[in-house]
Amino acid sequence: DAGVTQSPTHLIKTRGQQVTLRCSPISGHKSVSWYQQVLGQGPQFIFQYYEKEERGRGNFPDRFSARQFPNYSSELNVNALLLGDSALYLCASSLTTGTAQETQYFGPGTRLLVL
Amino acid sequence: AQSVTQLGSHVSVSEGALVLLRCNYSSSVPPYLFWYVQYPNQGLQLLLKYTSAATLVKGINGFEAEFKKSETSFHLTKPSAHMSDAAEYFCAVRNTGGFKTIFGAGTRLFVKA
């Protein structure tokens, strides 16, 4: 079975631009979460979506938004890019969002560089 | 609020030596704890997770971790390090609502030949 897939793998943008990152969860998984991993740090939670609804949001500005589609894939959008948005963006999928012990499966990430 | 602290940003061991990566957690409720590994330029792979079924948890690649409530610790160990174990390791806790995973800052493991 295919794991979590993300596209693109790498991206270079300039300050002020907008970017869209995409994620396809494992087949049968209905929940997608997004994390930002700045170089040298652990991942930081951005959003979780379940059944196309936002179920949780981390401490990120409104420039960050996301959505989930009927096929459970997801997009993360970042507007007005700043240099500090340069990071590895990770997508994780899980079956549901109901239990804290549920395993999240991570994709390979999209590495975003903002110049 | 839950949190995890990883002691030591870098750990270096010789091939064949014991690996010990330290993690302490803070949680007002029984925690769900995880260890992930990240190889260079890759995403995160789950090594093991603690869900209160057993205090000693065995994971993949020979790793195991022991949950110690009295010490609020969840240290990761492997009896004999292999060169392929060189990677970044993250300890993590799931928040009470279950919708986000809170990661530690990570420990980079170096394995010397």
Image (tube, coloured by chain):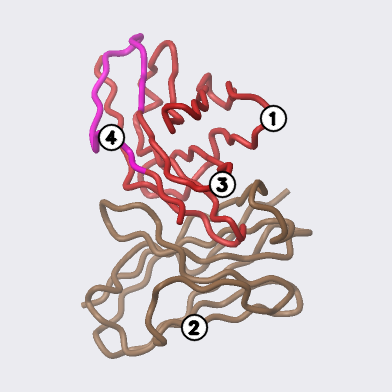
Chain colours: A brown, B red
Q: Is residue B90 visible?
A: yes
Whether B9 is among the magenta residues is: yes
- Vertical arrangement, residue A2 with respect to residue A38, above or below: above
- The magenta span reads B5-21
Residue denoted by label 3: B29
Residue denoted by label 4: B7
Q: Determine whether the residue tagged by mark 4 lies in a helix, strand or loop.
A: strand
Residue A65 numbered tag = 2
Q: Earlier in the sequence, mark 4 or mark 1?
A: 4
Q: CA distance from mark 3 to mark 2?
A: 31 Å
Mark 4 residue type: Leu
Q: Is residue B84 left or right of residue B98?
A: left
Q: Position of residue B52 (x, y in %)?
A: 65, 33
Mark 2 residue type: Ser
- Are labels 3 and 4 on one chain? yes
Mark 3 residue type: Val
Q: Determine whether the residue tagged by mark 1 lies in a helix, strand or loop.
A: loop
Count of marks overlaid on the render: 4
Residue denoted by label 1: B53
Q: CA distance from mark 4 to mark 2?
A: 34 Å
Chain that bears disc 3: B
Alpha-carbon neighbours of circle 2 within 10 Å: few (<14), some, or many (≥20)? some
> Residue at the location (50% across, 29% down)?
B69
